[in-house]
Image (cartoon, rainbow, N blue to C red):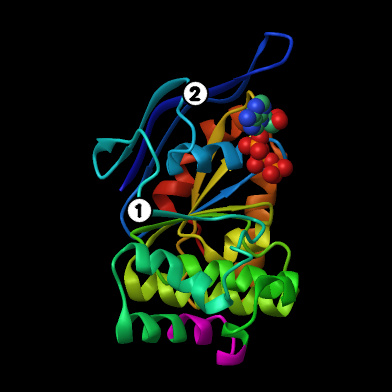
Amino acid sequence: MITLEGVSKSFRLDDGRSEPVLSDLSLNVPEGEFLCVLGPSGCGKTTLLNLIAGFTAPTKGRVLVDGAEIGAPGPERAVVFQDAVLFPWLTVSRNIAFGLELQGMKGRPLAERVSRYLAIMGLSEEDGGKYPHALSGGMSQRVALARVLALEPKALLMDEPFSSLDVDTRERLQDELLRLWAAHGTTVVYVTHSVEEAAYLADKVLVLGTPPGGSAELAVPQERPRNRSSDEFRAMKERLRGVLSEPLRSVRSHLSPYLEGGFHR
Ligand SMILES: Nc1ncnc2c1ncn2[C@@H]1O[C@H](COP(=O)(O)OP(=O)(O)OP(=O)(O)O)[C@@H](O)[C@H]1O
């Protein structure tokens, strides 16, 4: 569904020099795939997400969605940011309803959809009547997530959406996300710093190196639900850690066995 063809992105610095962040990146994310993008701080994860969202354009190469080159954001690609951005003048329920109303939903179907996603995110009907200033950071993030998930978009682009939450909430929301992903066949591009999160969530992991480094793809062909305390899961985390710690130019050269054969038990 999402294809990058030889994408490079550079930023012009104040002194006029150009800083390369992504270079010659090609990627294919088939419909329904859960892709995690993993890499050290500053490697270009958010830049990649912004390119797919259509917030920025590549310096070179093309970004295609369903075979058509994108030039702008679109309703089929919903973005969840690291920090919740809610409309402060609207209640929680009205925040969740906002995008749905723009799509023409109203009346009972709208109320039911809002209630369903409040419940999915562990928010009560009473929470639905609160204003954003009265919410904790974790609650705000759950509302931001409910607002995007309620749109049931074809593709979800997520930038470390759970990184500010406590471990219990994070793990519960990861499972909720997987459940919704499986139920709707959504394509997900999920940026994370966390090897654990990538090993738990992904069908495929794209590892980005420190610019102007290369990239590497690893398949995670383990069945779901994954058991975080299994040897298989621990071994996958070690494998990802290993890829992260190597210079990616050399990783790229011996990656194909991982992709073709997958990770063997
Ligand atoms: N609009 C911009 N103008 C100039 N430089 C930018 C811009 N956006 C990003 N960069 C630079 O591009 C590089 C990659 O940034 P990006 O935010 O994509 O990294 P990241 O992997 O998401 O980092 P983190 O994990 O810390 O969020 C950084 O060096 C950053 O300073």
Q: Would residue 149 appear left or right of 200 to someone viewing this image?
A: left
Q: Which residues are magenta?
A: 116-126
- Name the spot of residue 10 as percent of width and height, x first: 57, 21
Q: Residue at x 45, y 62 (%)?
A: 221
Give the mark nearest the N terminus, 2 or 1. 2
Which quarter of the picture shows residue 97? bottom left
Q: Position of residue 229 (x, y in %)?
A: 67, 77
Residue 77 horizontal side relative to residue 164, left or right: left
Instruction: Using a 10 Å C-alpha cutoff, classify the residue at mark 2 as few (fewer than 14 neighbours), some (14 to 19) or many (20 or more).
Output: many
From the image, tell me which residue sits under label 1.
75
Tell which quarter ligand 1 is in: top right
Reply above or below: 17 against 42: above
Q: Nearer the viewer, mark 2 or mark 1?
A: 1
What secondary structure prevails in the magenta region?
helix
Please give the residue where the numbered disc 2 appears in the rendered image: 8
Residue 137 as seen in the image, left or right of residue 198: right
Q: Residue furthest front?
A: 89
User: Which kind of residue does numbered mark 2 sit on?
Assistant: Ser
